[in-house]
Amino acid sequence: MPDLPAGFLDISRALPHNHPNWPGDPPLTITPGARMAQGDSVNTGVINTSTHTATHVDAPWHYADDAPTLDQVPLERYLGACLVVHVPPGEFVRAEVLSGLPDPLPPRLLLYTGQPARWATFPEDFMAVDPAFVHEAARRGVRLIGTDSPSVDPLTSKTLDAHHAFLDTGLLIVEGLNLSGVEPGEYTLICLPLPLSGVDGAPARAVLLPAGLMP
Ligand SMILES: Nc1ccccc1C(=O)C[C@H](N)C(=O)O
Ligand SMILES: [Zn+2]
Ligand SMILES: [Zn+2]
């Protein structure tokens, strides 16, 4: 794979065969389709995966039946100025994390909570987001929050308090980013979910560019 141009950072999680998914979801499989070695004219594959595999976006319909599906979310919401923040360890990302940061904030906030670049097994003990953090970020102009955790709510949550804070404030969610090795600071985010229709979410390719490269 050629290196990215200077200043580009790929913040997507790699998708190896059997990449571990949310407990209960089948792991990612890529089964062979056509094979040139067997006389076919090309090689192809068949992908089977959860919509919430590795780096992915949640469409609001994931957590509310009357909310937009992914095709109803404008792509521009995932593109543009963002701030990467390193979060101190703990059970939740708390509103105090924002206390030393500017007001207003850029429209997109990405949270590095210490997740490694690769998940050999599913990381069940990840940092969730406190709903108060979402409300305070929204008050300061944030419109999207991304995290390197597989969810903004704890694994066993049934009430999905953080997801509902996103619904109430209109903020969007990106989960499962790979932010290991990314310095805190301002960047331009390009996050491109697969253009699937009527879905609750989709895997995405996400990169960071130097700040100010795009509007
Ligand atoms: N596949 C699931 C099955 C059941 C419950 C949650 C999930 C999730 O994927 C959680 C998710 N990543 C989230 O958006 O918080
Ligand atoms: Zn998700
Ligand atoms: Zn989610």
Image: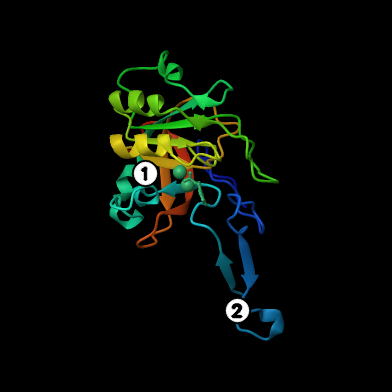
Query: Mark 1 CB in 8 Å range of ligand 2?
Result: no
Q: Left or right? Give the position of 23 relative to 130.
A: right
Q: Is residue 213 visible?
A: no
Q: Nearer the viewer, residue 94 or 145?
A: 94
Q: Left or right? Give the position of 105 relative to 153.
A: left
- Position in image of residue 76 (x %, y %): 31, 46
What crowding class fits label 2: few (fewer than 14 Cα within 10 Å), some (14-19), or many (20 or more)?
Answer: few
Residue projecting furthest to the top: 100
What is the three-letter code of the residue carrying label 2?
A: Val
Please state, as top left, top right, bottom left or bottom right, where the C terminus lies in the image.
top left
Q: Is residue 78 visible?
A: yes
The residue where tag 2 is placed is 42
Nearer the viewer's eye, disc 1 or disc 2?
Answer: 1
What crowding class fits label 1: few (fewer than 14 Cα within 10 Å), some (14-19), or many (20 or more)?
Answer: many
Quadrant where ligand 3 appears: top left
Q: Earlier in the sequence, mark 1 or mark 2?
A: 2
- Position in image of residue 95 (x %, y %): 42, 20
The residue where tag 1 is placed is 78
Vertical relation: 142 (above or below) 75 = above
Residue projecting furthest to the bottom: 39
- Position in image of residue 3 (x %, y %): 59, 45
Q: Nearer the viewer, residue 59 or 47?
A: 59
- Position in image of residue 192 (x %, y %): 42, 50
Vertical relation: 60 (above or below) 40 = above
User: Which structural element holds mark 1?
Assistant: helix
Query: Mark 2 CB in 8 Å range of ligand 1?
Result: no
Vertical relation: 201 (above or below) 151 = below
User: Which structural element holds mark 2?
Assistant: loop
The residue depicted at 55 percent of the width and 31 percent of the height is: 127
What is the three-letter code of the residue carrying label 1?
A: Tyr
